[in-house]
Image (spheres, rainbow, N blue to C red):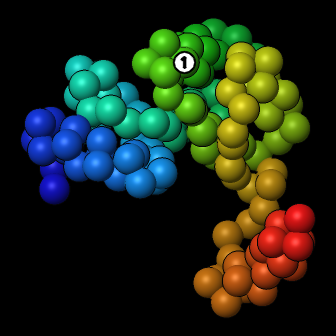
């Protein structure tokens, strides 16, 4: 289903939220996830690739875009996840902006499903043992 069908998407997202599911929008603010659609779709979080995550964050346009994406998600009452984080410097910069979630090679390389399951089982067992 295309997110451009905002009425249907909003109803679906609201139904999912009622069951405790959170719904995230990938590539926030681009393509079919235009800003008006984001603002009316009842989403709970967003994923964005800030240009500053592709190279060292040293000010200028990439920094301004990253700050804007984090602030926009906050203003829309959404959680923002920055993707493509490769260095401690990038992670620190995004945390200073208020972005509390991230993913990228700094945290781990992509792995096959079997390896992911093997790696995540001990953490799941610890969480259940609580």
Q: Position of residue 90 (x, y in %)?
A: 78, 32
Residue situated in front as seen by the camera: 38 or 68: 38
How many dots with numbers? 1
Q: Is residue 96 above or below residue 3?
A: above
The answer to which of 14 and 105 lies nearer the viewer is 14
Name the residue nearer the viewer: 127 or 37. Answer: 127
Secondary element at tag 1: helix
What residue is shown with label 1?
A: 74
Q: Position of residue 74 (x, y in %)?
A: 54, 18
Q: Position of residue 71 (x, y in %)?
A: 55, 14
Look at the image and tell me whether residue 106 can be seen: yes
Which quadrant would residue 82 be assigned to in this image? top right
* Vertical arrangement, residue 70 with respect to residue 100, above or below: above
Answer with left or right where residue 130 lies relative to residue 26.
right
Quadrant, the N terminus? bottom left
The extreme bottom residue here reads 114
Q: Position of residue 11 (x, y in %)?
A: 19, 43
Q: Residue at x 23, y 49 (%)?
A: 12
Give left or right: position of 94 versus 45. right
* Residue at 64% in and 46% down: 84
Q: Quadrant of the C terminus?
A: bottom right
Q: Quadrant of residue 28?
A: top left
Q: Report whether 12 appears left or right of 25.
A: left
- Where residue 124 sits, quadrant-wise, is bottom right
Q: Residue at x 45, y 36 (%)?
A: 44
Residue found 88% across the figure and 73% down from its top: 129
Task: Let me know if residue 90 appears in the view.
Answer: no
Residue 72, compared with residue 99, is above or below; it is above
* Residue density around tag 1, few if under 14, some if 14–19, many if 20 or more, within 10 Å: some
């Amino acid at each position: 289903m295309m997110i451009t069908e905002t009425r249907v998407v909003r109803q679906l997202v609201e139904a999912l939220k009622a069951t405790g599911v959170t719904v995230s929008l990938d590539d926030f603010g681009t393509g079919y996830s235009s800003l008006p659609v984001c603002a009316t779709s009842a989403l709970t979080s967003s994923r964005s690739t800030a240009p500053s995550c592709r190279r060292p964050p040293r000010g200028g346009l990439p920094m301004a875009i990253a700050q804007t994406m984090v602030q926009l998600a906050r203003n829309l009452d959404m959680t923002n996840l920055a993707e493509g984080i490769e260095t401690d410097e990038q992670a620190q910069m995004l945390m200073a902006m208020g972005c509390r979630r991230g993913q990228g090679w700094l945290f781990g390389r992509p792995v096959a499903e079997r390896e992911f399951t093997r790696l995540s089982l001990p953490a799941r067992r610890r969480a259940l043992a609580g």
